[in-house]
């Protein structure tokens, strides 16, 4: 009575599973870091959109002011950040300081990333001529 056994032994199955695990583990690690990177970029994109919206609303308020220099701050909860809008004359180091009625507009974005305080800015320059009296 000859019994012929077909199939894999337990050791062969364990070796095959270990090899598949070794081959797929870099893929899972890469996928995890890719998902974290995508989430970070999505948060950054949301911050930029909110800063741009804040820029336009602050610019409208600044245009209603008689003085050309203007400052406005806003705290946003989701995502947590502080937005600061400033209109100032160019600093002493800038080549634009020689031009009359040119102003530096800036929206500064500050947020906490873990334990690190991060900062970014949207910058533009605007020409605001003074009205001439007739």
Image (cartoon, rainbow, N blue to C red):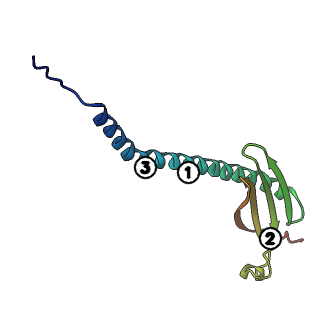
Q: Name the residue that disc number 2 marks.
A: 129
Camera-side residue of 97 and 9: 9
Find residue 128 and name its label.
Answer: none
Q: Residue at x 70, y 65 (%)?
A: 123
Mark 3 packing: few (<14 Cα in 10 Å), some, or many (20+)?
few
Secondary element at image label 2: loop
Picture quarter with the C terminus: bottom right
- The Cα–Cα distance between marks 1 and 2, rounded to whole angstroms, is 45 Å
Which circle's residue, 1 or 2, is located before the other in the chain?
1
- The Cα–Cα distance between marks 3 and 1, rounded to whole angstroms, is 16 Å
List x then y, in percent, for residue 100: 79, 78
Classify 78 as above or below 72.
above
Which circle's residue, 2 or 3, is located before the other in the chain?
3
Hey, which residue is sitting farthest front in the picture? 1
List x then y, in percent, for residue 40: 61, 50
Q: Residue at x 55, y 51 (%)?
A: 37
Find residue 37 and name its label.
Answer: 1
Secondary element at image label 1: helix
Secondary element at image label 3: helix
């Amino acid at each position: 009575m000859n019994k012929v056994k077909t199939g894999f032994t337990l050791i062969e199955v364990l070796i095959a599973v270990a090899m598949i695990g070794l081959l797929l583990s870099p893929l899972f690690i890469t996928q995890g870091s890719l998902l974290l990177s995508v989430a970070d970029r999505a948060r950054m994109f949301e911050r930029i959109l909110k800063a741009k919206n804040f820029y336009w609303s602050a610019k409208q308020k600044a245009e209603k002011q008689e003085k050309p220099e203007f400052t406005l701050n806003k705290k946003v909860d989701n995502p947590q950040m502080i937005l600061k809008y400033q209109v100032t004359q160019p600093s002493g180091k800038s080549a634009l300081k020689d031009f009359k009625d040119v102003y530096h507009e800036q929206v500064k974005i500050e947020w906490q990333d873990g334990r690190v305080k991060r900062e970014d800015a949207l910058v533009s320059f605007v020409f605001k001529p003074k009205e001439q009296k007739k």
